[in-house]
Structures are given as C-alpha cells and as structure tokens.
Image (cartoon, grey):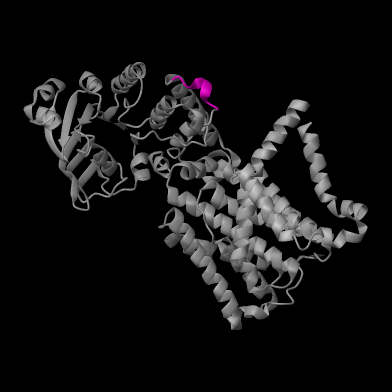
Amino acid sequence: MRRIAWTLGALGLVAVPWIVAGVAPGQRRYILHILVLTALWGALALSYDLVVGHVGSLSLAHPAFFGIGAYAAALLATEARWPFAAGLAAAVGLAGLAALAVGVPLFRLTEHSFAMGSLGFAMVTSIVATNWVDFTHGPLCITGIPKPALGPLRIVTLPQFWWLALAAVVLVALLYHGLTTFRLGRAFHAVRDNEGLAAAAGVNALKYRMLAFVIGAALAGGIGALWVGYINVLCPSELAVSVTVNLLVIVFLGGVGSLRGVVAGAVLFTALPEILRVAPTWRLVIYGSLLLVIVVKRPEGLETALRALGRRGARAA
Amino acid sequence: MALFEVHGLVKRFFGVTAVDGVDLALERGELVSLIGPNGSGKTTLFNCVTGYLPVDGGRVVYRGEDVTGAPPHRVARLGVGRTFQIVSVFPRLTALENLLVFLQQHQEESFPGRLFRTGRVRRFEREALDRAAALLDLVGLASHAATRAGHLSYGQRKLLAFAAALMPDPELILLDEPAAAVNPTMINQMKDRIRALHRAGKTVLLVEHNMDVVMDISERIVVLDHGQKIAEGPPDAIRRDPRVIEAYFGT
C-alpha cells in the first residue's frame, strides 16, 4: 500500500509538466516557473536544516555559501566559458572550502555569538558582491549566463528545468536522509541535544558541527550554480539577508530537523506568496498574519500538523 | 603504578581557588569516594580530570599517559566513563539510541566499511544492540527502549545516564552523586549496582553526599574542604577523624 503510494507520488512529480499543461494550459509557464523555484528552495532549505536542525548551530551564513556557488558558476560560465558540469563542481567545492575556512574561527563561538559571527560573514560576502564591481559586476549584475548543458543534453525548456530541479531536490533529500539517520545522525543529534554529554560519549562536537556545516555549504553552493543556470542573471541581492529570513521561515515553520517538515515548508512558503497575488494590496498582510497564526498554533512547525494528519489517516484506514 | 593519578591539581575561578593542590591515586579495581561539604571542590575536581575544565596547575595521568588538558571526548575514548550531577540524557533520542551513542565512538569503522556494511560493521551493530539491550534490562528500562529520553521520569533518566556511562565498558568510572534526589529503594538498588561494578573489577570514583552509601560501599575515602585534601583513609578512620568532623559540623 505504502509502496504504491510512493510510486504514484514519484510518477506524479515526474509528470508534473503534463499535469500542469492539462489543468491550466493558460498559466502553464507561470506555474512551472513557481514549481522550479519551489524545488530549488526545498533543496536549499534541506541543506540549511542539516546545520540548524541536526547539529543545532544557528548559522545565518547560508546565503553566503549559496552566493559563492552562484558567483563561481556564473563567472566561470561567462568569463572562462567552462562547461556547466565543471562550473557546478567548482561551485560545490568553493562553497565547501569557504565553509571550512570560516568554520574554524566561527565554531570557537557558541550559540548567539555563533549566529552573530555567521551573520557578519554573510553581510561581508554580500557587500563584496555589491562593491567589487570589477569582479562581480556589482549592481550591474552578471547577465547572459548560459543555460546548463550536460554533454549533448541541453536544458532549455521549462519542463527540462523542472526535471533538473526535481533531481536536485531528490538527491539532496536522499543525502539528507542518509546523513541524519543511523550512526552519523545519532552523533549529530547527540551534539545538538547536549554537547557536554556528547563529549562524555566520546563524540567530538566540533568535528561533527564542522562536517554538517561544510556539507550544508557545499550543497548550497551547488544549488547556487543551478539557480544561475535557470535564472541566467545574478545580482548581489540574491545574497541578501532576506534569503536568510526566507530560509528561517521555511525551516522553522515547516519543522526543524524533519525532512517532511522542511519540504512542506518550502512548498507552502514559496507557493503562498504567489497564490496571494490574487489580493495584491493585502498580500503581505495576509502572509504575515498566516506566519503569526502558525507560530502561535503550531510552534514546532507544520511537521506536527502533518504527523497528526497521518495518524488520523491511519486510523480511518 | 596506579591506574589513575592526580598530582597537585589546582583550579582557580577568578580569585577563588576551588581546587588547591590535590593529590589522588586510584589503584586498578579500587572503589574510592570523594566527600566534603558543599563547595569543597569535588565536582570541580571531576570536571578538571575529565577535561571539562582547563586546569591551572598539576597533572592528570591515566594508565601512565598524561591527559592534563586533553579535551573531554578524548578522555572518554581512553576509557574513562562519567556521569553528571545534573541528570544528563539526550532528550530527543530514544533510550536505546542514548546508549548506542555511547558505544559508537569507540568502534573504529571506516567510511567504505560503513557504505558497504562489511561483516565488521555488522558485527559492531549487533554488539552494540546486544549490549544496549542487556544494560537497559539491568536498569529496568527494557520496556522503554523506544521512548524518547526526554519523556522519561527523573529517576528513569538517572538510570539511563548510568547505563549509558557503562555502555563502552570503561575501565574507570566517575560517578557524580548517583544517589542524590532519588527515593530510598532506588538508593539501595544504586548501591548494589555500584558494588556489582566493583566486583566486576572496575575502578570507581564516587562523589556522594549520602553518608550511608559512602560509608557502606567505599574501600577508601578522600575528604576535601575548601579545595584541599584534609583526610584520606578507610571509612572507619574517616568517621572518627577530628578534621573531618570539624569540616562538616564546625566548632
């Protein structure tokens, strides 16, 4: 029964372009665009949750790693004419290396100081992207970033981008699942729940924090490369603090530390602002009020609501 | 050579000298208690010798190896187990997972080994599960294996923390007030368990305020007052020692 549901779900996701074309032919391009963004946000939020939800370090530096990957891929593609796959690999590697370099001093700080330190790094990265005009083009943005091509396979159309984004989010989700369950996940959670006791268990907290931080950053860098491959323009505003706010909303209101919760958060909080466009004047008011309602009613995130729904479903069946 | 030696340990907090030149030696298989009035430096000493606090002077030697200033996870991996005065568990892990965490860092496994789940890795997993089941049984928590530790009662968490410290089969076990804030029945059970550890050949260092427990099970007692060692000897001698009586009751 479960297997059938999973298979149908997977087929449904792959068939999304045709479903959308059938249901809303007039809005096809717009809906697919939102879905591609949702998948990319989902992947980014999952990479962020590895750090926030599983080793419990409230990093605010995630957009910086996303940005480092995005700029690396954009500049390598436009200036050095690197193929997409090489640019993607460079984005992953550079973002991971940057995390390794800033992680060493940052993890000397704990809790709030760590959050502030990481926010400082994010702001510096954003300022460099805006002001180092010779290198990043600053506010003029990098334009004409080529569409990705994997060997002979060129990704140009919206359905193709959907499949690429879907593959990315599935890959990140599998990695997320593998890293956060079993033995490694137990060590992560031990560090998150009680660092002092983790040390008594022989767990080196710094090592596991660093591991989650670097893997999360490398994934964010890769998603940055996909992002510029899709949007084809990169401006410094993509690294702004507002990205952190979005990630925090998705992860904390979705369900911190939960794959299902974070994915639900990404779907709801990417789609919601778009759906609310039917009421342009009241859009942000409604959005803000909804956030408040969720914070009050479900402080642990949508995950708890999903779980309750699942239980009710099981009882009904 | 003693299993565990502390030479002239000093720890200062700003102006206060919490531990002031304490010497301590534990022979293999000994059961020693550390007592003293509140604020005499017992827990500070524990935290210094297990790497939780940096020391300001002196040396800590375990199995002939200098471990002064070593980080706590390294001390743990050398085979020193400890519990905490304030009951410590991983609240969001299940009782079973709480125990598994305590063994896994002692099992050396390689990344490819984990990826392909080699025979060695499978044997590790089986060993860990068997040992965890046996320990949960020992402390009477077998039926709570799948319960999140945060949902257990205070007493149950205390038992779980005790079982977790035993998970890697440490040679030296430091227990910080195992009988504090538990009911009399459990105090007796705890006493029996500590005795059982001693009989199994483990070396135990106990910090405890409950004098019945201390006098009943210790082979040797070390008394601290104002960070200094004021007496050391078998329970009967300590009970009669005028310095100890003065430290506890004043004059």
Q: Is residue A32 above or below residue A194?
A: below
Q: Residue furthest bottom?
A: A134
Residue B114 located left or right of residue B137: right
Residue B8 located left or right of residue A288: left
Q: Is residue A59 above or below residue B93?
A: below
Q: Is residue A175 visible?
A: no
Where residue B29 appears, as percent x and y from the top left, is 25, 26
Residue A232 located left or right of residue B115: right
Q: Is residue A183 magenta?
A: no
Q: Is residue B117 above or below residue A277?
A: above
Where residue B148 appears, as percent x and y from the top left, is 53, 31
Quadrant of residue B18 within the rendered picture: top left
Identify the magenta region.
B140-146
Quadrant the C terminus of chain B occupies: top left
| Residue at left offset 75%, top offset 60% | A282
Residue B4 located left or right of residue A128: left
| Residue at left offset 75%, top offset 66% | A230
